[in-house]
Amino acid sequence: MRVLIPKSKPSKGAVGKTGLWRTSKPVVNHDKCIKCVICWAFCPETTIFRFQDNSVDIDYEYCKGCGVCANECPVNAIEMVED
Amino acid sequence: MTSIKQLPYEEYFLAGNGSCPGCGLTIGLRNVLKALGKEVYMVVPASCSSVVQSPFPNSSATVPLLNTPFAASAAAASGMVRALKVMGKDSVVMVWAGDGGTFDIGLATVSGAAERNEDLLYICYDNEAYMNTGGHRSSATPLGTFTGTTPTGKKENKKNIPLIMAAHGIPYVATASIAFITDLYDKILKAKDMKGFRYIQIFSPCTPGWLLPTEKSVESAKLAVQTGMYPLFEIENGIFKISAPSKAYLKKEKRKPLTDYFKLQGRFKHLKEEDIKLIEKWVDEISEEYASMDGKKVV
Ligand SMILES: Cc1ncc(C[n+]2csc(CCOP(=O)(O)OP(=O)(O)O)c2C)c(N)n1
Ligand code: SF4
Ligand code: SF4
Ligand code: SF4
Ligand SMILES: [Mg+2]
């Protein structure tokens, strides 16, 4: 008897390009950013890139536009703009 | 204490998963997995986390994850711990369960595994209702809260599961919050290196379930601590200790008004002044109780 085990494989975009869910998008003002990486730590989606120098950028392919990053940024360096 | 910048770059929970925008549980899970690293086996009962991990044949988790029926997670994890021991593997087994799966439906197997002091890390992400099936009240839902099954507000207080878990005599119990991410991270690091049954409960806002704007999930979790609605503490080998983020808010005069917390969320919109007074009484009592327990052996 053959037994099938329903085993999933790790993959990015497991439910598709979740960036399409977005109605507004976060835009980082790099002149204002103090590189605290708070936005990166709290992003529910793992869609903030954190670079070695602690600068950040958004992964628009998957960012769902929740706005947590903009809400938590201590210096208002992230603005939510209509997408 | 770990700082935000010291949180590891590595990600074990991938983008493009099935969570709603602003979901608190994914903020928690992402950072919990950073603390545990890749040597972890997850056990997940039916919950939003079953959906958030994404449908077959894909998985957003990069670590092994076993899905179990609702009430079975602690029992399945107990078996997994033993199997790994036989295989000579020194890995952490982590149950990642909702409040419904912990406070209510899974309580029998959770209590059984705790009584046997199984060597596993049990995490309950607490979004205070059965969110995956439409937001029905659980015994983790606070007094007065609107849910699909408590349309005029819940009549009972939240069940104090952390103290019930501590009464089992297990080595570690803690409450944590997705808003105090380094406190959470440090609690996971500590629990990771302990043996026996470890219980951690993480306050995890649910944006649709709480009728909460998606950008406010972290802010509301912070307010839950600052208003005394969700005190953070540890009970390590029976000794109770209030955690740093909650320390200042044990005193009533230091606490923020409950309405600061309530006004962000639609699930509290119907509350009248007398309802708020009742909830405040509960907050006052529990804060006083915890202040009197601080630093003492309680079990
Ligand atoms: C025995 C059983 N009863 C009911 C269900 C339906 N069900 C699936 S998930 C869920 C809600 C779980 O609530 P909770 O544990 O709090 O996790 P959340 O969905 O809030 O993340 C329910 C009722 C089920 N899968 N199995
Ligand atoms: S809007 Fe939300 S999902 Fe997008 S980057 Fe900001 S926190 Fe992450
Ligand atoms: S939270 Fe604001 S200041 Fe901090 S890294 Fe992000 S954008 Fe920069
Ligand atoms: S319903 Fe709530 S807990 Fe479930 S995925 Fe959505 S935000 Fe997260
Ligand atoms: Mg729940």
Image (tube, coloured by chain):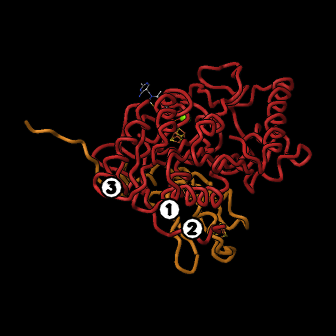
Work out how far the residue at label 2 is from the one at label 1, CA to CA, in angstroms. Answer: 7 Å
Q: Can residue B160 be seen here? A: yes
Mark 3 residue type: Pro
Toward the viewer: B79 or A6? B79
The chain identifier of the residue carrying mark 1 reads B
Q: Residues within 10 Å of mark 3 (few under 14, many from 20)?
A: many
State yes or no: Cβ of the residue under disc 3 lies below 8 Å from any atom of ligand 4.
Answer: no
Residue B121 x/y as whole percent: 49, 48
Crowd tier of the residue under label 1, counting other residues whose Cα lies within 10 Å: few below 14, some 14–19, many 20 or above: many
Residue drawn 48% across the image and 64% down it: A59
Q: Earlier in the sequence, mark 2 or mark 1?
A: 2
Q: Nearer the viewer, mark 3 or mark 2?
A: 2
Question: Can you tell which chain is drawn red?
Answer: B
Q: Can you identify the residue that label 3 sits on?
A: A10
User: Looking at this view, is A35 or B123 the one in front?
Assistant: B123
Q: Is residue B294 above or below residue B15?
A: above
Q: Residue furthest bottom?
A: A53
Amino acid carrying mark 1 in the image: Lys
Q: Please report contact status of discs 2 and 1: CB closer than 8 Å, yes or no.
A: yes
Label 2 residue SS = loop
**Residues at marks 2 and 1 on the same chain:** yes
Q: For mark 2, does the 10 Å Cα neighbourhood hold few (<14), some (14 to 19), or many (20 or more) residues?
A: some
Tell me, for residue B7, which label it has, or none: 2
Disc 1 secondary structure class: helix
- Residue hosting label 1: B34
Q: How far apart are the two marked residues, 3 and 1, measured between alpha carbons?
A: 16 Å
Considering every residue shown, the one lying at the far left of the view is A1
B289 over A47 or under it: above or below: above
Residue type marked 2: Leu
The quadrant in which the N terminus of chain B is found is bottom right
Image point 61% across, 54% down: which residue? A67
